Amino acid sequence: MSVEQTEHDGPLIPKPTLTLPALRQAVATVAPSRLPEFFEGMQRAFVEAGDQGSVTPIRMFYRHWGVIVEIERHPRIARRLHAAERALDSEDAAVRERAIREAGEIVRAAHSEVERG
């Protein structure tokens, strides 16, 4: 299933809950190319949780993917982040510095939104 990138300001999908089924569906919708990464991370998180006897790795996995989905479900924000990521390869230090600030602002805002639930 692919999502048509539109020019509206609203999100492509509602904010998912931080559960495995909801995040899996959200990633499949807004970032399907990242599903292999999602499943590899899920496997690592569950193995680490078993090794540590703690649910913390699973919670961190959910939060990590919640942030990714929060960014990717907003096409304009996702484009800004991806442009900043590409700008990190610039030979111009000022361009790299602006890109770092831009990416940091986007990721911090997504973390804050995920924290709010």
Image (cartoon, rainbow, N blue to C red):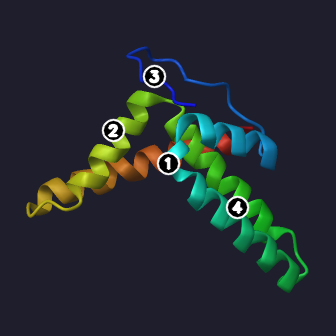
The residue where tag 3 is placed is: 4
| Residue 36 position in % (x across, y down) | 58, 58
In this image, 87 relative to 73: left or right? Answer: left
Note whether 12 is above or below 84 in the view shown. Answer: above
C-alpha distance separating marks 4 and 3: 27 Å
Q: Amino acid at mark 1?
A: Ser
C-alpha distance separating marks 2 and 1: 19 Å
C-alpha distance separating marks 2 and 3: 17 Å
Note whether 29 is above or below 49 in the view shown. Answer: above
* Image marks 1 and 4: residues in contact by CB distance under 8 Å: no
Residue projecting furthest to the top: 8
Instruction: Work out whether mark 2 precedes mark 3 in sequence or the reverse, and give the earlier one.
Output: 3
Instruction: Work out whether mark 2 precedes mark 1 in sequence or the reverse, and give the earlier one.
Output: 1
Q: Amino acid at mark 2?
A: Arg
Label 2 secondary element: helix
| Residue 29 position in % (x across, y down) | 60, 34
* Image marks 4 and 3: residues in contact by CB distance under 8 Å: no
Label 4 secondary element: helix
The residue where tag 4 is placed is: 61
In this image, 60 relative to 90: left or right? Answer: right
The residue where tag 2 is placed is: 80
Q: Amino acid at mark 3?
A: Glu
C-alpha distance separating marks 1 and 3: 14 Å
